[in-house]
Image (spheres, helix red, strand yellow):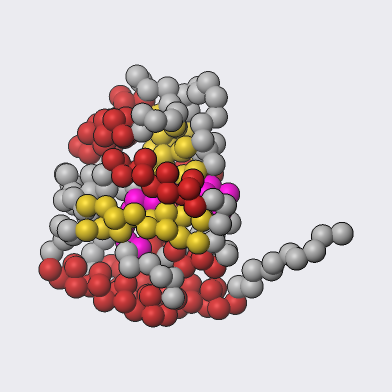
Amino acid sequence: MVTSADAPIAAAPRLSVVIAVRDEAENIAPLIAEIDAALTFEPFELIFVDDGSSDATLAELRKAAATRPYLRILVHATSCGKSAGVDTGARAARGELLLLLDGDGQNNPAYLPEMVRVIDAGGAKVGMVQGERQGRKDTNFKRFQSRLANGVRRSLLNDGNRDTGCGLKVVRRELHLRLPLFDGLHRFMSALVKREGYEILTVKVVDRERWHGVSKYGFWNRLWVGIADLLGVWWLVKRRRVPQVVERG
């Protein structure tokens, strides 16, 4: 079940920032402050999806929303995962561009204006701009598993993306809503966007350490499901045919 506490917004913005969070209470206020500072060039709406938090995340969101009419809150009754949270936010969004980032502080919103500029400059053929992390702050083991997973994914899916794990993305909303929803979609968006016939561009971003709290993902809790997802996405990519209409009567 999803409930909402939507504040009135004067006009539909072009940009919708969507963030799915679970147990990120200490990160909410500083992250919103950074978003406010970064997105001064154009009106935007900010949508947080609380994915079944058990801490004070919802209280922190409500406190921030009290002084920000552009901030909207959606709440999952139980945790459904990051991809489901982003999908909930995307369906509620009113902007034509979705600006996606994680809620743990590792993704710097300062890169979002450049990513919006890149997708605008690319035109309708570009479906998504993906952040590509530099100076990763993860442990050596986590960097190793990330390089291994990215290498296997690229060789199997040929998505041309070196870093699908970066949470910073700008994607066209109507395109995002066409992608097949499953738990783990966020790790395969490049392949699925390319499957729809769109190009993907990248912007180099500097990775940061998590501010507070603990990661929701580990090696063992996503190894086998990641393999199953990879094979499933490979099948979807292989079976997709994008028709090109050359004549209209």
Residue 115: in sight, yes or no? Answer: yes
- The answer to whether residue 50 is above or below residue 4 is below
Quarter holding the C terminus? bottom right
Compared across the picture, whether 158 is left or right of 125 comes to left
Residue 45 position in % (x across, y down):
44, 32
Numbered disc total: 0
Q: Which residue is drawn at 45% across and 28% down?
A: 43
Q: Residue at x 34, y 79 (%)?
A: 152
- Viewer-proximal residue among 12 and 103: 12
Which range is magenta?
164-176
Residue 183: in sight, yes or no? Answer: no
Residue 225 position in % (x across, y down):
37, 72
Residue 131 position in % (x across, y down):
33, 55
Q: Residue at x 80, y 64 (%)?
A: 247
45 inside magenta stretch? no
- The answer to whether residue 146 is above or below residue 27 is below
Looking at this view, name the residue that lies furthest to the right: 249
